[in-house]
Amino acid sequence: MKQEDKDDPRVEESPSALNFEYNINRYGVLFLLAIIFAALAGLFSSGLFSSASEQNSTTTTNVNYDRFERLMSESEINIAIQNVRAERYIVSIGDSLLENYQMGDIRPEPDSMYSKSGTLYLIYNAADIKPPLSLWVSVTPKKPGKFTNTIKVNSEPEITFSQFVWP
């Protein structure tokens, strides 16, 4: 058998496949690093850019929350009430928060609570609490998307804040 009769052992490579592999190697690492830095910064959950705070126009109520949430992952919203003089604090939580999130623990527990027209009302007797009052509400997103939530204390201006829930 002659050498010429044997098949050529070289593999013929496609230039387009080689270019594709080269670009994946070149830019894939950058893409993965961008995802890692975004996660560390809080783009997908808790982190540097995720934590946010909103205050009403009279600076009597402050809400601390995470801008970005993950679906079915519990987080907390802190409502701080200061410089409000009343016999009782009535904290109303808007319907968007109730429809799109599963409510968990509420600390401290309210003296009473009720729901009316899609709004949850938490009632605290002022005599039982030393100001400032700090409420912690545990919430778990039920569906992905961007949601605008409202919280109001007594007759003070309401606070509106937005959260984005990743699937």
Image (spheres, grey):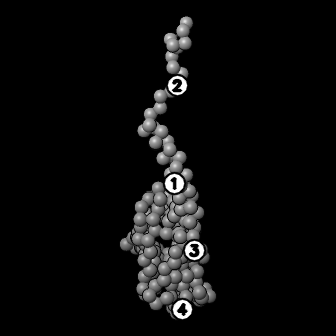
**Foreground mark, 2 or 1?**
2
> How far is mark 2 from mark 4, CA to CA?
82 Å
- Amino acid beneath label 2: Arg
Residue 70, how many percent across, how many down? 51, 60
- Amino acid beneath label 4: Asn
Relative side of 160 to 70, left or right = left
User: Which numbered disc covers residue 136?
Assistant: 3
> How far is mark 1 from mark 3, CA to CA?
37 Å
Crowding at dot 1, Cα within 10 Å, few <14 / some 14-19 / many 20+, comes out as few
* Circles 4 and 1 in contact, beta carbons < 8 Å: no
User: Which numbered disc covers residue 31?
Assistant: 1
Q: Find disc 2 in the rendering and name its residue.
A: 10
Residue 129, how many percent across, how many down? 61, 85
Could you tell which of marks 2 and 1 lies nearer the N-terminus?
2
Q: Find disc 4 in the rendering and name its residue.
A: 83
Would residue 98 be seen by someone viewing this image from the given angle?
no
> How far is mark 4 from mark 3, CA to CA?
18 Å
Crowding at dot 2, Cα within 10 Å, few <14 / some 14-19 / many 20+, comes out as few
Q: Quadrant of residue 125?
A: bottom right
Q: Secondary structure at mark 4?
A: loop
**Foreground mark, 4 or 1?**
1
Residue 120, how many percent across, how many down? 45, 73
User: Which numbered disc covers residue 101?
Assistant: none
